[in-house]
Image: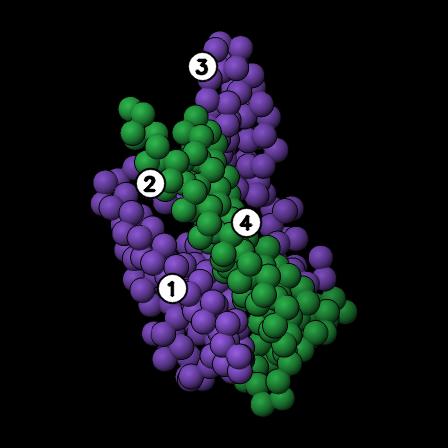
């Protein structure tokens, strides 16, 4: 409560929205069918009931109904994002392997900052997660528009250059989807 | 059909091998790095790809489980970086500073500013 007043405030001023409810219901239902992978009537009915309950409980914290996922161009962007992300993840792991296995431990750590242009909260979360899984960076905190990133090998302190090095390839795609 | 099954089996075993190598490297990184934040870096990345790769390998060995395992992979992809972010944020605010002296630190000022603002609001 003391550290995150904004979250605490939003819990009181919460309004039930049907759109969010339906989105979360569909997602929970899909996960249920993925896990059971059977189509007996009892399973189907139990799945619907449990999804309704879970969706009703979790809808107030649910925060990804803004994107219109069904548009074909968005799906193309998501696929592109996925491949960029997998490439970055593999590169990050090779980078970790290189650093860990070299005897002199080549690190030069520091915490840098940059500003993002994204406004959507869910998009910010995706960007933060992607930054955490790319080579040598770990998102520590997001305060409004500022990302604070722990960088294992600091080459520059200037926010603009940091942005270009760390976030640009991901943010370019996310801006196309969410703005 | 038999041949496809055999090929899938070997690809799955290769995935499991690669995944376990990365998991081992992650553990080694946690042992070798000097402070908490660098340890989190090594731990998060290596364990994410390692776990994903092992689970995918198991999925190729047992194709009936593949859908469940893909859901678990997506869940790991979201949950692992989030948890490491929560750990890093909490430990910074609990007072664990980064190790090296000449280190660049933009985050400390922002945290102080935020705390001041909260205290001001709290008093009035």
Identify the residue at image location x=64%, y=81%: B99
Circle 2/circle 3 CB separation < 8 Å: no
Chain B appears in which tint?
A: green
Residue A33 drawn above or below residue A158: above
Q: Chain of mark 4?
A: B
Which residue corresponds to mark 4? B79
Residue A112 drawn above or below residue A72: below
Q: Nearer the viewer, residue B28 or B107?
A: B28
Identify the residue at image location x=36%, y=54%: A86
Disc 4 to disc 3, C-alpha distance: 29 Å
Mark in front: 2 vs 4 = 4
Rendered purple, the chain in question is A
Q: Give the residue furthest to the right.
A: B123
Circle 1/circle 2 CB separation < 8 Å: no
Mark 1 falls on what kind of element?
A: helix
Name the spot of residue B105 as percent of width and height, x first. Answer: 57, 81
The first of marks 2 and 3 along the sequence is 3
Which residue corresponds to mark 1? A91
Q: Are marks 4 and 1 on the same chain?
A: no
Disc 4 to disc 1, C-alpha distance: 20 Å
Mark in front: 3 vs 1 = 1
Mark in front: 2 vs 3 = 3
Circle 4/circle 1 CB separation < 8 Å: no
Disc 2 to disc 3, C-alpha distance: 26 Å
Q: Are marks 2 and 4 on the same chain?
A: no
Disc 3 to disc 1, C-alpha distance: 40 Å
Mark 4 falls on what kind of element?
A: helix
Name the spot of residue B28 as percent of width and height, x first. Answer: 58, 65
Mark 2 falls on what kind of element?
A: loop
Tag of residue A39: 3
């Amino acid at each position: 409560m003391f550290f995150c007043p904004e979250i605490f405030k939003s819990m009181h001023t919460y309004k039930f929205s049907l759109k969010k409810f339906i989105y979360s219901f569909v997602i929970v239902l899909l996960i249920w069918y993925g896990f059971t992978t059977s189509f007996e009537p009892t399973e189907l009915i139990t799945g619907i009931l449990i999804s309704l309950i879970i969706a009703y409980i979790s809808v107030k914290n649910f925060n990804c109904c803004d994107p219109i996922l069904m548009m074909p161009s968005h799906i193309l962007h998501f696929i592109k994002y996925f491949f960029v992300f997998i490439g970055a993840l593999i590169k990050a792991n090779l980078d970790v392997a290189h650093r860990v296995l070299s005897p002199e431990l080549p690190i030069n750590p520091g915490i840098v900052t940059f500003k993002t242009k994204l406004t959507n909260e869910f998009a910010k979360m995706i960007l933060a997660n992607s930054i955490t899984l790319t080579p040598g960076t770990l998102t520590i905190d997001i305060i409004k528009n500022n990302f604070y990133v722990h960088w294992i090998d600091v080459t520059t302190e200037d926010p603009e250059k940091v942005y270009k090095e760390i976030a640009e390839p991901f943010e370019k795609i996310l801006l196309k989807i969410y703005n | 059909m038999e041949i496809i099954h055999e090929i899938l089996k070997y690809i799955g075993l290769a995935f499991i091998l690669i995944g376990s190598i990365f998991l081992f490297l992650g553990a080694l990184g946690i042992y070798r790095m000097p402070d908490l934040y660098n340890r989190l870096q090594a731990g998060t990345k290596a364990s994410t790809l390692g776990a994903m790769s092992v689970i995918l390998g198991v999925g190729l060995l047992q194709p009936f489980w593949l859908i469940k395992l893909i859901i678990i992979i997506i869940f790991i992809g979201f949950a692992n970086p989030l948890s490491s972010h929560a750990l890093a944020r909490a430990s910074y605010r609990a007072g664990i500073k980064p190790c090296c002296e000449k280190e660049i630190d933009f985050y400390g000022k922002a945290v102080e500013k935020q705390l001041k603002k909260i205290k001001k609001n709290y008093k009035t």
